[in-house]
Amino acid sequence: MKDDQDDVAIRAASKIFGDMLRRQRQKSQWMFRELAEKTEVEEDIISQLEAGEPVGTEIEHERLCEFLGLPVDTFAKLIRNQRALLETTGQSSSETMPSNVVKISGYRNKWAKTTTHPEA
């Protein structure tokens, strides 16, 4: 059970970390190739990290964070936060629906009730 929670926490932290890296890289206008050369982290690893995959070493994470102006312990803090969130709520932040996502099924049901349907 604890291993499952750790896996969920790592996956959730990886997704958040990847989003942070991508935003910082794009904001700084770095291309994958340039960032890979400057940080000595392979392009594939950077791409996979930005996609939210739990890859790379702690040193690679720290190099990227340092180069992009993020605190070097960002990934470790994200994992701790996700573990704490799992312990208190039973859900990681990636399992909860973001506020900008709408459940369309409620609207679809309401629409179906108010819309006339042509008879066959």
Image (cartoon, rainbow, N blue to C red):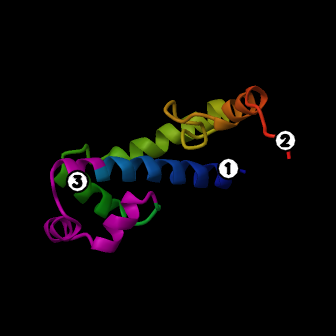
**Residue stretch in magenta:** 23-52
Q: Quadrant of residue 3?
A: bottom right
Find out whether residue 47 is within the magenta segment: yes
Q: Earlier in the sequence, mark 1 or mark 2?
A: 1
Q: Which residue is mark 3?
A: 25
SS assignment at label 1: helix
Tell me the kind of residue under disc 2: Glu
Q: Earlier in the sequence, mark 3 or mark 2?
A: 3
Badge 1 density bin: few <14, some 14–19, many ≥20, Cα 10 Å: few
SS assignment at label 3: helix
Contact between labelled residues 2 and 1, with CB atoms less than 8 Å apart: no
Which residue occupies 16% across, 59% down?
30
The foreground one among 67 and 52 is 52
Q: Which mark is residue 119?
A: 2
Residue 66 image position (x, y, % from top left) = 20, 51
Q: Which residue is mark 1?
A: 2
Residue 91 image position (x, y, % from top left) = 64, 38
Q: CA distance from mark 3 to mark 2?
A: 55 Å
